[in-house]
Amino acid sequence: MTSFNISIISDTVCPWCYIGYRRLQKAIEVYQKTYPGGSNDTFNVEWKPYYLNPEAPTEGVPIQEKMVSQMGAASAERVQAHMASLASAEGIILKYGGKTGNTRLSHHLLHFAKSKGQVMQNDVALELFRLQFKEERDITDIQTLLDAARNCGLDVEEAKAYLASSSDHKEVDMEAAAIRESGVQGVPVFLFEGGEHIVDGSGDVMEFFEIFMKIKGDQGCS
């Protein structure tokens, strides 16, 4: 049996990260269904913090408004339609009526969730994406974060107390800074087996699948 270790460097406001994860998930499903004995192998996924805009306001701003101000209404419409089409192919509903801003607190929630296990952290990461892009919520709003915690089965009061404290917050910020200083300039980045194999960008199903095969082969199990 092989245990695959995958780290995803991501920001919670990044639709490409959401799309990339779904492609990874599909690759895992294909591998486990088609590779001999693959159903016995396990996949450990850890989310690592990256702040696309560390100086973003702590109070959310409308995504639509921000995109129009950055690229104009016509370009924003084209980009949104293109992204929505790509997302739809991965089973993702991508809308732009929510708000975006500083993601620091959402990464602290992910760090808290990780203390309850990698499966819980993964669930919370996906719920944050769902709330942001399908439900059009505000990623900077504490209530959005607590709703994500509640929906995933975390103790809401414990999560609220953690987010209000300074516990581990510096650790998360330092990790995010170290990742940026290591040369990462955008997300997502997928690291397999501590960086032996890297996918820079959202990747595709076959690219991920081939990495699984390489790892399996490296372990003498091909």
Image: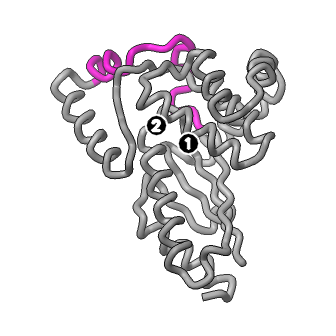
Tell me what residue is drawn at x 38 percent, y 48 percent: 91
Residue 10 is labelled as 1
Whether residue 181 is visible here, answered yes or no, is no
Relative height, residue 204 to residue 46 (above, below):
below
The image quadrant that residue 85 belongs to is: top left
What residue is pinned by disc 2? Answer: 14
Q: Nearer the viewer, residue 35 or 111?
A: 35
In x, y percent, where is residue 54? 57, 25
Q: Is residue 197 magenta?
A: no
Tell me what residue is drawn at x 53 percent, y 65 percent: 28
Relative height, residue 155 to residue 35 (above, below):
above
Image quarter hosting the N terminus:
bottom right
Q: Is residue 51 magenta?
A: yes
Image quarter hosting the C terminus:
bottom right
Q: Nearer the viewer, residue 191 or 20?
A: 20
Q: Assign a secondary structure to mark 1.
A: strand
